Amino acid sequence: MNKKLLTLNAVLLPLAVIVGWTLSKATIIGKVGIHVLHREYTFLNSWWKGALLIWIVWLALEFFQYRIWKKYPPNTNRIIQSSLILLAIVGLYFTYLDFRTISHNLLGQRFHIGGYLFWVGWCIISIFFIRLPKDEISINPDVN
């Protein structure tokens, strides 16, 4: 089990670096807008800060979804994880709509790709827990 989670994180960590890098590649107008109007997002100008934040969020989602996987039977787990994939797709759609507005459109295509990849990462986590088999140990009761 731990080996499988390490494999998942071996996929998510480089993806988080890519997301952090793309989020740091806003256009000059976008960077000025972040620096002047939205100072709370200035951490996005540094690729490693954005990557660290994305990876921490994915780790929190992974922990949450792992708890679901442990608690519920496989059929219920599939329904919950599939619902989370749908939620991520809805988030991706609304991110797309939001990036089509004039102010967010000025951030540039590379920044947009980083926003989209965040949702893809969440889908990867959900698919991982859908496909992960239950490691149930069957205990044979003593039959007299």
Image (cartoon, rainbow, N blue to C red):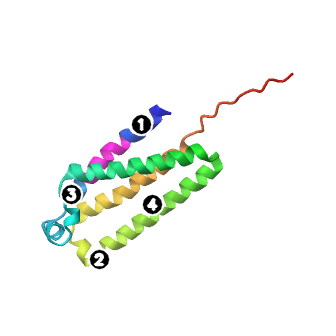
Spot occupied by residue 106 in the image (x, y as percentages of width and height) = 20, 72
First in residue order: circle 3 vs circle 2: 3
User: How far across and how far down the image is residue 73, in percent?
Assistant: 64, 46
Tell me the residue at 59%/34% (across/down). 135
The answer to whether one can see residue 126 in this image is: yes
**Which residue does the numbered mark 1 point to in the structure image?**
7
Percent position of residue 27, x then y: 16, 65
Q: Residues within 10 Å of mark 2 (few under 14, many from 20)?
A: few
In the rendered image, which residue does mark 4 sit on? Answer: 88
Callout 4–callout 3 Cβ contact below 8 Å: no
The segment highlighted magenta reads 11-20
Q: Look at the numbered disc 4 and give the secondary structure of its residue.
A: helix
Q: Specify whether residue 16 is painted magenta.
A: yes
State the mark number for residue 43: 3
Verify CB contact (< 8 Å) between mark 1 and mark 2. no
Q: Report the side of 5 relative to 108 (left or right).
A: right
Q: Earlier in the sequence, mark 3 or mark 1?
A: 1
Disc assigned to residue 143: none
Type of secondary structure dominating the magenta stretch:
helix
Q: Are marks 3 and 2 in contact (CB under 8 Å)?
A: no
Task: Please tell me which residue lies in front, 14 or 139.
Answer: 139
